[in-house]
Image (cartoon, rainbow, N blue to C red):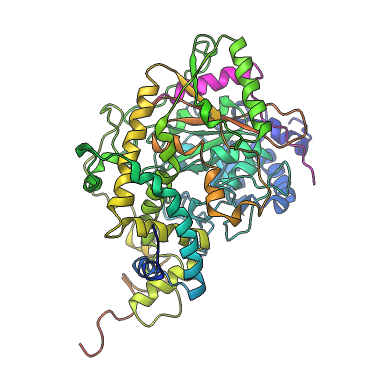
Amino acid sequence: MHLDKEVIKRTAELARLNFSEEEIIEAQKDLQKILTSFEVLLEVPISHEHDARSAFSTKGLENKDESLSHMEKDQVENSITTSDFLAQTPSREGAFVRVPAILAQST
Amino acid sequence: MTNFNYSKEFCSHDATFLAENFRSKKLSIVEYISNLFSYIEQENPSLNALTSLQKEAALQRAKELEHRPAQSHEILFGVPIVLKENIQKKGFPVQCASRMLEGYKGQYDATVVSLLENAGAIFISTANMDEFAMGSSNEHSCHGPVKNPHHFKHSPGGSSGGSAAACAAGFAPLALGSDTGGSVREPAAFCGIYGFKPTYGRISRYGLVAFGSSLDQISPFARSISDLDIIMRILGQPDVRDATSLCTSYESQLGKENFLKGRTIGVPRSLLTNAVDKRVLVAFEKLEAKMRDFGTKFVDIEISTLKYTLSVYYVLASAEASSNLSRFDGIRYGHRTQQAQDLFELYSQTRTEGFGKEVKRRILLGTFALSAGYYDAFYGRALAARDLIVEEFAKVFETIDFIYMPTAPSSAFLLGESSLDPMQEYLNDIFTIPANLAKLPAISLPAPIDDEGLPIGLQFYAPQGNDAQLLALAYDLEKQGLVKTTAFKNMK
């Protein structure tokens, strides 16, 4: 399948990465090579049991054999203090993290 | 106290030996660790294996341990260990070989760190790696590449290249790495030591900086199987902090039965094409022949879904990585750009400045695979293919005990050689990736080398959960001299 520059640019935007024009061309070549080798995936039979949309289930993580693993219910424990956690924040004010304004001035 | 010629002896001391001598007070921990640091300070600059030596902390801990008796559960009392720099330890740098986390220090202890310190171990340093564990050569690191201790112009493998090189060079008898697609087994093969990836879920991932969450496993390096057994007894425990942790514990099978006689081992013979280095094939066939002499049965097997392996892995691993690395946004920790007018710019400029080329390439690939319009074609199909691979391995293991393959298609390549073509570097992982996809335990064993050439790794897989049986097989192979750590000759 062919990847055009617009697709790469849009993907980069989604990934929050900036690429120069040169880097976009290089990324296009690289990804094209990688994706061509992935065409073998189009042969994979998808039965109703293997519905691609069921990707949101944790099927990929759980072992079929129940005795091998399990999921636990989350329990809230304050295992790290706010001061420890925010100690390495690039810009903070007390218990707050400083960021550029999210809403424009005129709003 | 005993008189060692330390610089010649470090490689011959395994953790089993050290723990015994430290526990009985026959050897001074402080004296040993001090001499070890002198050796490391001398040798590490040429290898670049270790990134942040923690001499003060280590000696402080050594003093504390020296002045009291060892408790019965402290089976690694005083033993030095190296930690890949993507594993959290409070106060240690956890840089993941990335500019994104320059200056970042661990904010909590990973489960593996707590367990090992509880067993008396001393973490002496962080180890170099490929950035965010993405790579098989340890050339994608903001600290610069790691050199293979056996031949400095060659790669030690990756992504846990620093840990492997450190263990091979005698900087510590045990080193922790992480294995997502072969990142511990391949460097173990290239550096001539043992590298063991447990069953997915066997060792807790709590505290491991996530790359591919359904594939990652913290995995140990060692120069003897008895050391791997000790570390597995400590680390192979259920952990409530890791939802994917197994319910059962590792229980050693070392020496309990003869693992060479009467076992059936499957070989995917059709994979051993001329893409595999001749010297590797010779070593592979030599071990097979010797094992037959000991009563092991070999059968040829076909695993048809292996043709999907590389694509499935790279789609899933990149997709998971793109999700996992989205937390690096310059807000709460790590690098933040100084050049942003708004939040969007802050995110994108921070990430562009912080991530290296290979990481960006994989994030791009992963984001693409997950984006609307392509999701079903790539990510959806990769998940379906993964299920097929898991099923096929389960079926194959119904009639055999282990699978045997080389660890990598070649021995250590030259630094700079593989970074030209992305697909070339990915092909290095062709024998290791299936174990991560199918969640199987797998081990790389060093073939005996007698021709001054580079180390060669030979690999075995076992069914899910059979970690102890796999180590027991390896133990018997080691006992009979059929596999052997490659001697470190300390060449300049």
- Is residue B139 something one can see in this rendering? no
Residue displayed at 56% across by 36% down: B221
Residue displayed at 43% across by 65% down: A88
Pinpoint residue A34: horizontal percent, then vertical percent. Answer: 46, 54
Pinpoint residue B183: horizontal percent, then vertical percent. Answer: 52, 43
Quarter of the image with the N terminus of chain B is: top right
Classify residue A63 as left or right of residue B197: left
Q: Residue furthest bottom?
A: A106
Question: Can residue B479 be found in the magenta stretch?
Answer: yes
**As drawn, B289 above or below B381:** above
Pinpoint residue B466: horizontal percent, then vertical percent. Answer: 42, 23
Highlighted range, magenta: B466-492
Residue displayed at 33% across by 58% down: A81
- Is residue B259 something one can see in this rendering? yes
Residue B10 found in image quarter? top right
**Viewer-closest of B192 and B87:** B192
**Viewer-closest of B478 and B266:** B266
Residue displayed at 40% across by 44% down: A40
Classify residue B414 as left or right of residue B363: right
Pinpoint residue B246: horizontal percent, then vertical percent. Answer: 34, 32
**Viewer-closest of B250 and B124:** B250
Question: Can residue B326 be found in the magenta stretch?
Answer: no
Number of numbered discs overlaid on the protein picture: 0
